[in-house]
Image: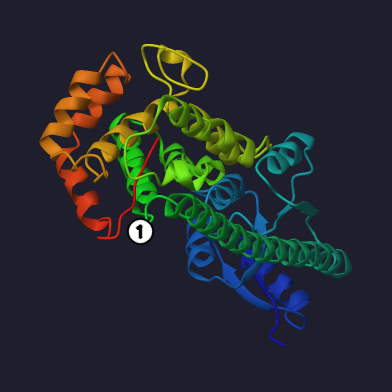
Amino acid sequence: MSLQTILVVDDSPEVLDAMKSILKRHYALRMATNGRLALQIALSDSQIDLILLDVMMPEMDGFEVCRQLKSNEHTCHIPVIFVTERNVVEDESRGFSLGAADYISKPASAPRVLARVATHITLANHRRHLEDLVRQRTLLLESKTRELEATRMEILHRLGRAGDYRDNETGMHVLRISHYVSLLGKKIGLVASEIESLGQAALMHDIGKIGVPDQILLKPGELTADEFAVVKRHCEIGADIIGMHESPLLQMCRTVALTHHERWDGAGYPCGLAGVNIPLAGRMTAVADVFDALTSNRPFRACWSVDAAIDKIRAEAGHGLDPSLANAFLELRPELDGIMATFPDGLGERAHHG
């Protein structure tokens, strides 16, 4: 096992010789006769385990050396023991405030030097060991957290697409909605974490369709008023499926499922909310959902062109849709084309009501 290294800093050759005779049998030694050389050695030698530092030195005293050592991330962890002839309380107070670990008075006896050095090296070793354990546990926790995040995202993807598969054989509708909402979030200046959560929550906007009977959901034609009343219940069904949770993401999923068919003018469902009383996540999903519904095939009509859908979004601003969000969405045309090309529906697409 290699010896631990001590840097001895003193402008007196006699003191350096004395320290060398005391420590050489137990430690590897580096010597410096002034503060600037001491700093160079400490910064260039990553193996310095402790520094014995004279206080009174020309040009740069020990206090300044200690201050610079403790202000540098590469050397701040090294224990510093001041060795001084001055026995002044103010000096000790200043040294400790700068981060010194201990004081030894000159002339220093061999037993005292060895005991103080051994104590602080042991403490430093324990601290490094604990820091290593914390670092390892932190890395493990971060890895597990990333794994859980990836699993959660995969579950949301699959659940969202499971709901979409009932009336859209490719399940691409929810993926497009997720990307549209994420783009819109970025456009209006939301932070990355909010954008990610919104994109994930949008995947679940139609999960309530699981509770709508097939003969209504898959009906090849327009719905009667009674049938449409059943379809409208998918918002509340989705909110019930997701339930009430402490998880902010699941809370947002529930909000999106419940409110993505509310209208800015208050004529939407299921609660008839209006304006900013509709949660932002629901308003954003509504814009994306209207656009995707218009640009997707239906059994009772062909899909609209993107230009026509854009015109409809513009016309609905301030009526069915939040005007600021609708206008922001209109500026995303190139990105919208890219998402549609990346996530196209298949040829076997079924009806899509609601």
In the displayed structure image, the side of residue 305 where residue 325 appears, left or right: right
Q: Circle 1 sits on which residue?
A: 170
Q: Position of residue 209 (x, y in %)?
A: 50, 42
Instruction: Please report the residue visible at 36 percent of the width from the left and 11 percent of the height from the top.
Output: 265
Residue at the bottom extreme of this rendering: 1
Q: Position of residue 197 (x, y in %)?
A: 48, 41
Q: Amino acid at mark 1?
A: Thr
Instruction: Please report the residue visible at 70 percent of the width from the left and 75 percent of the height from the top.
Output: 20
In the displayed structure image, the side of residue 106 where residue 242 appears, left or right: left
Q: Quadrant of residue 247?
A: top right
Instruction: Please report the residue visible at 52 percent of the width from the left and 53 percent of the height from the top.
Output: 159
In the displayed structure image, the side of residue 99 where residue 65 appears, left or right: left
* Residue 211 seen in this snapshot: yes
**Residue 25 vertical placement versus 189 (above, below):** below
What colouring style does the render use?
rainbow
Q: Nearer the viewer, residue 105 or 129?
A: 129
Screen quadrant of the N terminus: bottom right
Q: Position of residue 157 (x, y in %)?
A: 47, 54
Q: Quadrant of residue 146?
A: bottom right
**Residue 325 vertical placement versus 157 (above, below):** above
Q: Nearer the viewer, residue 91 or 16?
A: 91
Instruction: Please report the residue visible at 18 percent of the width from the left and 22 percent of the height from the top.
Output: 314
Q: Position of residue 120 (x, y in %)?
A: 78, 62
